[in-house]
């Protein structure tokens, strides 16, 4: 019996790469995004990669409670259980906080925070069914900006800190129910969302790299995955934050 994975923000970037990887590893997929044309194209591609797989697109806006709840009802009707939820959908902005519009700040909060909470909450009944049907796991995609506050990313960092906190609390809340929760903190990734930042090439990952790390979290028991360089810096930060600030300035 194939495991079922739900992936938000699946039409491009990390979400698309994760969907493609999971399809080659035998998962059936519920792929979610706002753009129907891109989802249709993705499903056709997934079907070619894995002719025996089952792939269903769901057009939804994770920033809307109503849209998420409607999507969850469709997923519950289409699939007997869900084994994996990848909360990947996200919004990004880069610039001084005084130049970011209130509408953009609302978008960041609604997509990056409310979207993760709403999707998780709405799909919990299906994930609970997955516990006895191969296991259940939730993967939340945060960011290195969810560990440090970077200049020109204040609002974005705030939302990704929230994702980290939500994942940490949820992992303890759902552990007695045998639902694993992990959070991944990618460093710079070459996606459309990252447009406007200027990371050094040696620090940039491609979406496929992050997809492999997400799969490893699904298959393992770790609660957090942090880019190795930033993991070392997080330890150093406890000793000398000024030194870390200098290093971060050079690589980001």
Image: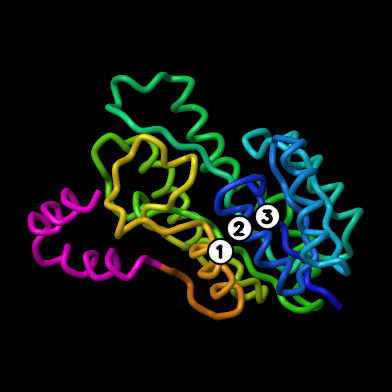
Query: Residue 8: where, in percent of width, then height?
Result: 65, 49
> Which residue is found at the position 69% from the left and 42% from the top?
33
The numbered mark, 1 or 3, whose residue comes first in the sequence reads 3
The numbered mark, 2 or 1, whose residue comes first in the sequence reads 2
Contact between marks 2 and 1 (CB within 8 A): the answer is yes
In this figure, which colouring scheme has been used for the structure? rainbow
Q: Quadrant of the N terminus?
A: bottom right
Cα gap from disc 2 to disc 3, whole angstroms: 11 Å
Q: Eyeballing the image, is 174 above or below 203?
A: below
Would residue 242 be counted in the magenta stretch? Answer: yes
Q: Closer to the camera: disc 2 or disc 3? A: 2
Q: Residue 165, located in which quarter of the rendered image?
A: bottom left
Query: Residue 73: where, in percent of width, then height?
Result: 85, 47
Q: Which residues are magenta?
A: 226-252
The numbered mark, 2 or 3, whose residue comes first in the sequence reads 3
190 or 74, which lies in front? 190
Say which mark, if any, is on residue 211.
1
Read off the residue under disc 2: 17
Q: Closer to the camera: disc 1 or disc 3? A: 1
Q: Residue 34, located in which quarter of the rendered image?
A: top right
Cα gap from disc 1 to disc 3, whole angstroms: 11 Å
Would residue 198 be counted in the magenta stretch? Answer: no
Read off the residue under disc 3: 7
């Amino acid at each position: 019996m194939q495991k079922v994975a739900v992936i938000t923000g699946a039409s491009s970037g990390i979400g698309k790469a994760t969907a493609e990887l999971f399809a080659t590893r035998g998962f059936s997929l519920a792929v979610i995004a706002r753009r129907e044309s891109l989802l249709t194209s993705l499903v056709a591609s997934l079907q070619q990669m894995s002719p025996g797989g089952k792939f269903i697109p769901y057009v939804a806006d994770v920033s809307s409670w109503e849209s998420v709840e409607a999507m969850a009802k469709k997923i519950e009707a289409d699939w007997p259980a869900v084994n994996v939820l990848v909360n990947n959908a996200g919004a990004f902005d880069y610039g001084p906080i005084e130049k970011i519009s209130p509408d953009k700040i609302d978008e960041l909060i609604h997509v990056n925070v409310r979207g993760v909470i709403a999707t998780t909450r709405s799909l919990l009944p299906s994930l609970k069914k997955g516990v006895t049907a191969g296991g259940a796991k939730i993967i939340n995609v945060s960011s290195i900006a969810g560990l440090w506050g970077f200049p020109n990313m204040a609002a974005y960092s705030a939302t990704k800190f929230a994702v980290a906190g939500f994942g940490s609390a949820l992992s303890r809340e759902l552990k007695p129910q045998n639902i694993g929760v992990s959070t991944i903190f990618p460093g710079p990734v070459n996606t459309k969302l990252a447009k406007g930042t200027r990371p050094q090439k040696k620090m940039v990952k491609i979406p496929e790299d992050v997809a492999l790390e997400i799969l490893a979290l699904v298959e393992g028991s770790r609660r957090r995955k942090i880019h190795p360089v930033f993991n070392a810096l997080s330890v150093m930060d406890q000793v000398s934050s000024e030194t870390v600030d200098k290093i971060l300035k050079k690589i980001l």
